Amino acid sequence: MTWLLDLDGVVWLSGRPIAGSARAIERLRDSGRRVVFFTNNSGPTIADHLAVLAQAGVNATADEILTSSQAAASLLDPGTSAAVIGGPGVREALAVRGVEVVLATSGPAAVVVGRTTELSYEDLSAAATAIRRGARFIATNSDATMPTPDGPVPGAGAIMAFLSVASGVEPIVAGKPGVAAGQLVADRVGQVEVSVGDRADTDGLFSQVTKSRFALVLSGVTTDDDLPVKPAPDFVGETLMDIVDQALGT
């Protein structure tokens, strides 16, 4: 039995561990369940994610980390080219896939967009032009925001929206709850028992894609004031530990 956990808003907020998350993961593993992480945060590399998990007291391996960057890369054929608006995690996933990262002005086969805090108008303009000229427009995810200890900040969806308006083209969204993300889970994880996340519009819908039960935590983007949500979760808790207590019994 496998539990699929989001990271931002479930295990940590901007890298700061959420109280009890490490113990909750340990309890799941002690119960015989496999724990796999799927994050829509495309910016960090796999090594980055593993390092922050270790700092949070969670031991994990690279094959237990799935990302929206990997889902986006899976949509491109090895040997093709892509321009990137995004962080090093996107570039890493494309390199592993065998996709060459090139400038948007060089006629790439695709433009792959993820969350990044390093943006320039020139880069965005070149990317929009490449998309208008026929490059495939692939977004790692469409999350409008991502949670932090100080509240939500703009996510990849905000950058995606800029380019969509500027180019007049709707992107293919690879990450949760997209088809590519579902295929990535099917290929690398198999059947999922419970999907845990902090957003109904991504994690909740993705639970339907993976045919798993949906557990909603209120430690990230979603709060008590947002309830009820659709799809309706099977479990609701303030933290991951609350979810585990409900599922396994206190």
Image: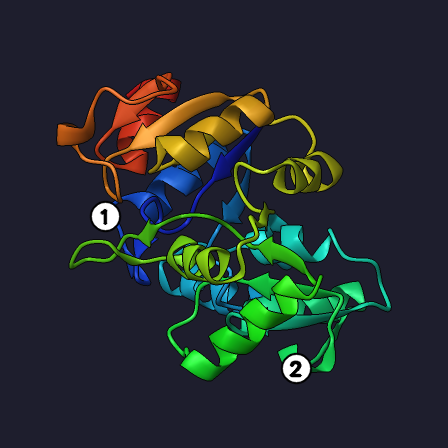
Q: Is residue 19 left or right of residue 25?
A: left
Marks 2 & 1, CB-CB < 8 Å contact:
no
**Lower sequence index among marks 2 and 1:** 1
For residue 230, which quarter of the picture? Answer: top left
- For disc 1, the neighbor class at 10 Å (few under 14, some 14 to 19, many from 20) is some
Residue 11, compared with residue 194, is above or below; it is below
Query: Which numbered marker is on residue 165?
Result: none
- The quarter of the image holding the N terminus is top right
Query: Which numbered marker is on residue 19?
Result: 1
Give the residue pinned by disc 2: 105
For residue 138, which quarter of the picture? Answer: bottom right
Relative image position of residue 105 (x, y in whole percent): 66, 82
Judging depth in this view, the residue of 10 and 24 nearest the camera is 10
Q: Residue at x 57, y 52 (%)?
A: 169
Residue 146, compared with residue 90, is above or below; it is above
Foreground mark, 2 or 1, reads 2
Relative image position of residue 132 (x, y in whole percent): 62, 63
